[in-house]
């Protein structure tokens, strides 16, 4: 299943992240792909907010993964940036796949580098564009159909338009 929408500001991309953050649960996987500056980290900032986390989200480019949680509790967010990895062997060698079994939501920037290590059951965002305009394609498996309906309805109230697309 896939949807396409347009974001015309960084705030709108964050709001989309926030709406998705409200419907995800521990064990869920979200991947974010798009050029440098596409808005992957901006989206993740919103995602954290939607999950109820007040942490300041920064890019994990050098650390590969940042872990966010409020005190000891859940929800936890594991924020990956796999830009610096060559392939999924690097990912496995560093033991990073262990995060998939942990009690939290995983979000991965530059996920195509490790595509073969990723579950098909996930929400994929493909972001493209320039200036302030971003075309955001959201591909998701059946499991997320009703959650994405909720996200769509919430964002449409804010004036964001969605189209069903086939990819
Ligand atoms: N519609 C938009 N959505 C998201 N970001 C936007 C938008 N319009 C402009 N921007 C700007 O684009 C930049 C997005 O930066 P961000 O760090 O989120 O990108 P990124 O995809 O994580 O990049 P990187 O690949 O380097 O990690 C910010 O400077 C933001 O202000
Ligand atoms: Mg980033």
Image (tube, grey):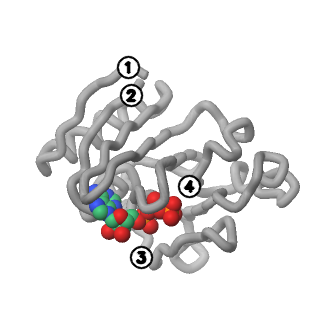
Residue labelled with disc 4: 109
Residue 32 as seen in the image, left or right of residue 166: right
Specify whether tag 3 is near ligand 1 (CB below 8 Å): no
Residue 1 as seen in the image, left or right of residue 90: left
> In the rendered view of the protein, which quadrant contains the N terminus?
top left
Q: Quadrant of residue 79?
A: bottom right
Name the spot of residue 143 as percent of width and height, x first. 49, 29
Q: Secondary structure at mark 4?
A: strand
> Circle 1: is it few (<14), some (14-19), or many (20+) Cα within 10 Å?
few
> Circle 3: is it few (<14), some (14-19), or many (20+) Cα within 10 Å?
few
Residue 14 is at least partly visible in this image: no
Q: CA distance from mark 2 to mark 4?
A: 19 Å
> Circle 2: is it few (<14), some (14-19), or many (20+) Cα within 10 Å?
some
Name the spot of residue 149 as percent of width and height, x first. 29, 34
Residue at screen point 56% across, 64% down: 76
Residue 150 as seen in the image, left or right of residue 1: left
Number of numbered discs on residues: 4
Residue labelled with disc 3: 54
Residue labelled with disc 2: 2
Q: Earlier in the sequence, mark 1 or mark 2?
A: 2
Q: CA distance from mark 2 to mark 3?
A: 30 Å
Look at the picture and state if 112 lies above or below 67: above
Q: CA distance from mark 4 to mark 1?
A: 23 Å
Q: CA distance from mark 4 to mark 3?
A: 20 Å
Residue labelled with disc 1: 166
Look at the picture and state if 50 lies above or below 32: below
Look at the picture and state if 97 lies above or below 144: below
């Amino acid at each position: 299943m896939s949807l396409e929408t347009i974001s015309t500001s960084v705030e709108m991309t964050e709001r989309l992240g926030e709406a998705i953050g409200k419907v995800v649960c521990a064990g869920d996987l979200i991947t974010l792909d798009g050029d440098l500056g596409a808005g992957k980290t901006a989206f993740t900032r919103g995602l954290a907010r939607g999950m109820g986390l007040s942490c300041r989200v920064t890019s994990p480019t050098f650390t590969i993964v940042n872990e966010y949680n409020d005190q000891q509790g859940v929800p936890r967010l594991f924020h990956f940036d796999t830009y610096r990895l060559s392939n999924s062997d690097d990912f496995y060698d560093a033991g990073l796949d262990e995060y998939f079994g942990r009690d939290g939501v995983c979000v991965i920037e530059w996920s195509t580098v490790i595509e073969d290590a990723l579950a098909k059951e996930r929400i994929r965002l493909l972001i493209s564009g320039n200036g302030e305009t971003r075309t955001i394609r959201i591909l998701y498996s059946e499991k997320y159909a009703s959650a994405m309906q909720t996200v769509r309805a919430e964002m449409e109230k804010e004036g964001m338009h969605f189209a069903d697309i086939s990819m």
